[in-house]
Amino acid sequence: MTERQTGAWLKGLRRLVRQIGLYPTGHPLTMEALMSLRGATDDLVPEGGQVVISAMENAFYLNRTILPHVSLEYHSFIRELDERGIESITALHPVTDQDLLDLSALLANVSADFPADGSVLLNERYLTPEDLEAAPTSELRRSYVSSLDALRGVTGAMRTDGRFEMAPVVTAVEGLFEQSVSQSSASLLLSTVKSHDEYTFYHSVNACILALAIGRMIGIDRHYLIPIGVGAVLHDIGKTAVSTSVLNYPGRLDKEQWKEITIHPQEGALAILAAGGPGHEISATVAFEHHARFDGSGYPSIHREKRPHVYSRVVSVADTYDAITTRRAYRRAETPNHALDALLSGAGASYDPDLVRTFIDMMGIYPPGSILEIQGGALAVVVSKSSEPGGPLDALLVRDPTGRDIDPEPYALHPRDVSRQLLAQHVGIDPAALLENLEPSVQVG
């Protein structure tokens, strides 16, 4: 049983919950969602056995093992379960379709009835925090989750009231900063967490992590780094003023659609200024200029003699890197190496060439989270760059040459032995999920 299988099950459950909330049980879309969850259930629950999924301490656990990536990607689902008083879900083989429908109806608030003796049981196994495995990067994960929650709250407030409170965002960024200082490599690896369903939230937090790392690399003081990080988290907040149909439009935008898109930097900057708070001018500048290019082009228009502020240029590099490596509704994800090539190609025009070089030096030619195929067919995940120029990368061997998954083991990977770089979704490996399951002797950061 793997984290990937549990994630697929939670994804299927959440989808069925949504469909049951909209359509009756026999509706084709509901039945399609049920069949998807049916397949994920068969894949997760062993024949003649059972699994227990617990939601505690802001994390999902499979039996007693923490699921770090799933906890981040589905952390809003943890809140929903908590609101309904559900701490654990036990699935007993064979799980029936009716029990899956009953569970989804309960979670969708369509029905209050749930069988107490079926193949799916609620709160059957009670676990205390002491029963669960400790996670060495729990504080880092909590800071990440806090940032997601703060951004989600800000976005909701902007959509309903047209304004928001700055304090929760500042507090969240301060937490990310402190954790990234103490676990620098781990924080970079954590930025590989992606969520297609909530692209904007995850992308903005990842951009913040990367911007803080760049800022520390070039010696920016904490006093300025926190507002830079806040600006990174909020750089797309102005998109609340743009219609969803335009934001998710799959083709080439027409003139009116493009005009609507280009207002989001100034809308975001105005919202940040209205919210106020320490360093809000810096944060507003970052939001205003994050699409302004180094050579003065882009939007909003900035004269060549007056390039975007260095703080904005830092966030622009971080923003672009994460955007390229994340799958969106209208574009596939690219490899980290492809993203570095794009930054290098745009250096001097779109991006500050000094910051691009700094970023590449910080990340290495194969950034943390890169999945590399080694000559012979084995797969390894990069944890951190080499400690010396031209030296081996700190990596984890995760799949042997026969294609069999193995317990992650430390591996000194020489770049010359790399056959190719692969996308996580193509090989079923979640780099960030490796973080909290490492033995202390191979922990990073």
Image (spheres, rainbow, N blue to C red):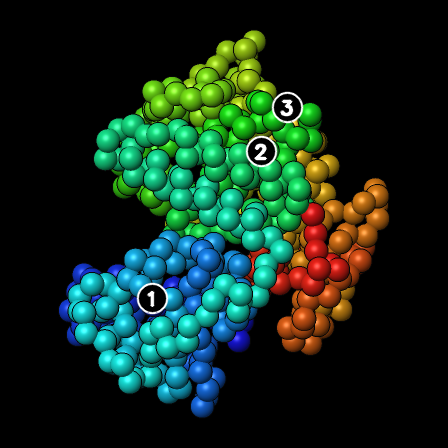
Q: CA distance from mark 2 to mark 1?
A: 37 Å
Of 248 and 196, nearer the camera is: 196
The answer to whether 395 is drawn above or below residue 175 in the figure is below
Residue type, numbered disc 3: Asp
Looking at the image, residue 295 sits to the left or right of residue 84; the answer is right
Q: How many marks?
A: 3
Residue type, numbered disc 1: Ile
Q: Is residue 45 visible?
A: yes
Q: CA distance from mark 1 to mark 3?
A: 44 Å
Q: For the point 40% across and 86% down, which residue is it?
A: 93
Q: Give me the disc on residue 86.
A: 1
Secondary structure of the residue carrying tag 1 is loop
Q: Give me the disc on residue 211.
A: 2
Tell me the mark number nearer the camera, choosing from 1 and 3: 1
From the image, tell me which residue sits under label 3.
Answer: 221
Looking at the image, residue 130 sits to the left or right of residue 23; the answer is right
Of 31 and 56, nearer the camera is: 56
Q: For the point 39% across and 70% down, which residue is it?
A: 88
Residue type, numbered disc 2: Ala
Of 286 and 336, nearer the camera is: 286
Tell me the mark number nearer the camera, choosing from 2 and 3: 3
The x and y percentages for residue 56 are: 44, 61
Q: Give me the disc on residue 209.
A: none
Q: For the point 63% across and 52% down, which residue is it?
A: 369
Q: For the point 52% across and 58% down, which residue is it?
A: 69
The x and y percentages for residue 412 are: 80, 58
Earlier-in-chain disc, 2 versus 1: 1
Earlier-in-chain disc, 2 versus 3: 2
Looking at the image, residue 172 sits to the left or right of residue 317; the answer is left
The x and y percentages for residue 113 are: 19, 74
